[in-house]
Each structure stands twice: as structure tokens, then as C-alpha cells.
Image (spheres, rainbow, N blue to C red):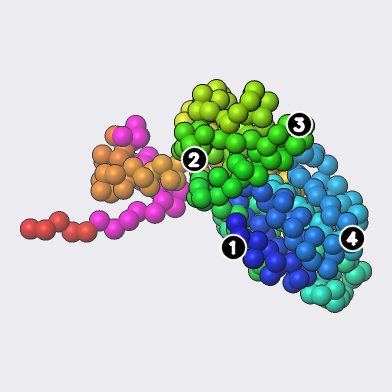
Amino acid sequence: MMDLRDRVKEAAFVDAPVLIEGERGTGRERVARLLHELGPRKNAGFVRVDPDDEDDPPRVDDELVRAVGGTLLVKEIAHVGRGPQKRLLRAIRRTGSAGRREGSGEFLDVRVVAATGVDLSRAVADELFDAELYERLGAMRIVVPPLRRRSEDVPVLLDHFGRTEARDLGLDALSYTPRAVDKLLAYSWPGNVAELRDVVRRLCLRRRRGPIELSDVEVVLPPIVERVPIEQLSFEEMVRAKISALLQRMEGYAMEDLYDEVISRVERPLIELVLERTGNNQLKAAEILGLNRNTLRKKIAERQVKVSETPPKKK
């Protein structure tokens, strides 16, 4: 986190768009606020807009106006529709480095900071995200690693939140027994720093006197641990989630032939993987898929399925 803070300090004084990459709960908004507080715009406003909290795309325009002179944070930029994307791009075009006017149009003095938990390059490849907007945002990136990849920070965060959360509740700072810390270190923290903070708050409310024991941690963690990871969701649930996200991100597109588009995106990788598994034996692949061999050949051509070359068998 010290390395991350140094990166933020470097970026704070470069008045250009920033893309903050990281999972939910890693503290992306805190990084954005730190960029604002350390930079030359610290005395102006910090405005955030979260497309997951709103149904009205023009609100991005309203927030841009409110953020003039300061910083606009757009959370989950991948979920912003095509219309707001274009308006953000126009705002960035009109805001030159260090406040210089760029191109034609009305000058708009706003620093745009965007946060994403997904790979925007894939959204660009799928034509769901504006390529120029991605290029401008991606010129300066800050990556916030998930908590499971920096376990050395867990004891520091436990101590920090053990003081701040206890203070908010009017309690003395928390302390932990070694076994309690070991249990907390062994946890994967899928919700990252936000989840750790919530766990510490629960421990504050549970503690009677003395340090936090292993038994306290075991009572607090199970409800969180038992949440079903996404990879354990049923196939239908995952498909529904993907299609729901696709529909949300296709705002502004002409939604024509959507059925065929979705079926194509499922069929193509399915056929490719089965062909790979059978060594490109189309007869075996057709049997596995439950298709007629001629039907499979037709789908390979229609879906532009990539058929990898199979090396010749040794004699």
C-alpha cells in the first residue's frame, strides 16, 4: 500500500484522466479521493457518480457540471452507457493537460477519474466501450490489488480499523490474540478491504473485555465464508448474470438480432472447446454436442469457429 500511495502522489499533480483498476471493496474510491486531496484541485469539489446506482444516463452531464474546477469520479465505468461515454469523452477532449484548452468547443475544467473492476479492453473488443475513451483513460492507470494478494497488509488494516471502528462506537481500540490473527490471515477476503472493515466492526460489537479471541472470529466469519462464490453458481445463474450485464452495457446500441448474437457467443466457444478436446475429430465432436455432422460443419462456417491445426501423427 505504501507503493500504491507513492503512485498516487505521482499521478496527483498530472492533470489528466486516470483509470483506477481493481475489484470492488479494494478502496478505489479512496484512491480517487486521495488523488483529489493531494492535487491542485483539492480546494474544489469532488463529485462521484455510480452508474449502478442510477437509471438516468443524463445524470453524468449533471455531475460533470457540478464537478467543474474539481474532480469527477465515475465508478464502474464499464457500466456507463454509450451516450454518457460520448459525453465523458467530449469533456475530456475539452480539458487539456494543466487546464489548457484542447480542440474546439466550450472549455470544461474537470479532471475525470474512472474506476473499473473488469477488463475494459475486452469491452472495447466487443464494441461495448468507446475505444478512444478507453485510450485516453488508460494513458494513466493505477492498479489496486485485491487483499488476498497482499496478506502482509491484513495485520496493519486490522490494527487501523480496530482503532477507527472502536472509536466510532465509543469503545477502546481492539487487540487480537495470535490465534485470532492467524484465522483472519487465513481468510481469502473476497470482499477485500471493505469486508475486513465490516468484520472488524462486528468484532467491536461482540467484544466484552480483553483481546479478540479465536472463538470471536469464528462466530463472525462463517456467515461471510458461506457466501457462494461466483464459480459455484449454476450455469443458468451465470448465463443470466452475463446477459443482464450485456443488456445494461448495450444502452445506446440498436438492439437487433440479439438472440442470434447471444447464441453465437455461446455456441462458438463451446464448439471450439469440444473440437479441441476431440483433437479436431468432427465426428466425435458432433456426437458429444448431439448434432448431425453436417450441422456441425455448417455451424463451424457460420460462427467462424477457430479450428486449430492438429499435428500429424508420428508413424
Determine whether label 2 and label 4 are within 8 Å by CB. Answer: no
Name the N-terminal-most of marks 2 and 1: 1
Circle 3 SS class? loop
Asked if one can make out residue 43 in the rendered structure from this viewpoint, the answer is yes
What's the CA distance linking mark 4 and mark 3? Answer: 31 Å
Looking at the rendered structure, the kind of residue marked 3 is Leu
Can residue 132 be seen in this snapshot?
A: no
The numbered mark, 2 or 4, whose residue comes first in the sequence reads: 4
Question: Is 153 within the magenta?
Answer: no
Q: Where does the magenta region start and end?
A: 288-310
The residue at the point 80 percent across, 40 percent down is 54
Label 2 crowding class (10 Å Cα cut-off): few <14, some 14-19, many 20+? Answer: some
Residue at image mark 3: 169
Instruction: State the residue position of label 1.
Output: 3
Instruction: Determine which residue is flagged by label 4.
Output: 44
Query: Label 4 to label 1, Cα distance in Å?
Result: 27 Å
Q: Earlier in the sequence, mark 2 or mark 3?
A: 3
Q: Which of marks 3 and 1 is nearer the N terminus?
A: 1
Q: Where is residue 113 shown, x and y percent of the image?
A: 74, 59
The foreground one among 294 and 151 is: 151
Q: In this view, does 196 lie above or below 96?
A: above
Marks 2 and 1, how far apart at CA: 21 Å
Q: Does the magenta stretch include residue 299?
A: yes
Residue tagged 2: 185
Instruction: Estimate the x, y position of residue 286 in percent, counting from the top left.
Output: 31, 38
Q: Is residue 301 found left or right of 38 in the rendered image?
A: left
Alpha carbon distance from label 2 to label 4:
40 Å
Q: What element carries label 1?
A: helix
Query: What is the residue that sits farthest to the front in this orientation?
Result: 210
What is the x, y in percent for residue 50?
A: 76, 45
